[in-house]
Image: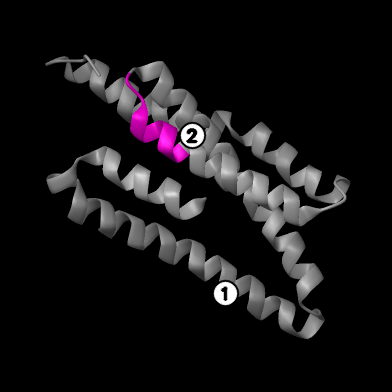
Amino acid sequence: FGYGNDTVARDLYLGSNLALASSVLSLPFSGCIGFASDAVSSRKVLISLTALVGGLSAIGTAMANTYPQLIFARFVNGACMSGSVPVVFSLLSDWFDDEERNAASSGFTAMMGAGIILGQIFSGCTGPSYGWRFSFFVSGFLTI
């Protein structure tokens, strides 16, 4: 990405700005996705669109050639990832009755944690051989 030996710029862009875009600045957009789960006629369509855009943004992350492209792709991906959570909880409330809803919600939450752990392991194992972009391609294609 052109930072060369400038470790300060590398750390600023990859460590600070990227995390800011994907975690903090995307929150208002993810909140809008959450509110939309109560306003749209089909939450299934909403979660499908969120997964599609999220998967495409992961592939966009892998294909980014500049910092602005990378930051934008991570911004969109962060909004879709965090925005999908309230939609899924809303769907779970439709699919499960009161007695089963807690177990379904707990299972979903556990799967989010497992996905983070397995994603880190996968990236750590494949990154040295295939490069950092590979995990984003795989994540994007699996999401879609």
Contact, CB < 8 Å: mark 1 with mark 2?
no
Q: How is the image coloured?
A: one colour
Residue 10 vs residue 37: left or right?
left
Residue 69 vs residue 88: left or right?
left
Q: Where is 39 relative to 66, above or below? A: below
- Amino acid identity at mark 2: Ser
Residue, x 24% and y 21% (percent of image)?
Answer: 10
Q: Where is 16 relative to 55, above or below? A: above
Q: Main secondary structure of the magenta part?
A: helix
Residue 22: image tag: 2
Q: Residues within 10 Å of mark 2 (few under 14, many from 20)?
A: many
Q: Looking at the figure, which quarter contains the N terminus?
A: top left
Q: Secondary structure at mark 2?
A: helix
Towards the viewer: 107 or 46: 46
Residue, x 58% and y 32% (percent of image)?
Answer: 26
Towards the viewer: 133 or 108: 133
Q: Return the disc, 1 or 2, that comes first in the chain's sequence.
A: 2
Q: Position of residue 12 (x, y in %)?
A: 31, 21
Q: Residues within 10 Å of mark 1 (few under 14, many from 20)?
A: few
Was residue 118 drawn as part of the magenta stretch in this picture?
A: no
Which quadrant of the figure has residue 61? top left
Residue 91 vs residue 58: left or right?
right
- Amino acid identity at mark 1: Gly
Q: Position of residue 45 (x, y in %)?
A: 74, 51
Q: Where is 133 relative to 69, above or below? A: below
Q: Secondary structure at mark 1?
A: helix
Q: Position of residue 54 (x, y in %)?
A: 54, 42
Q: Position of residue 123 (x, y in %)?
A: 26, 51
Give, as a single range, the part of the protein colored magenta: 58-65
Residue, x 71% and y 54% (percent of image)?
Answer: 87
Residue of label 1: 107
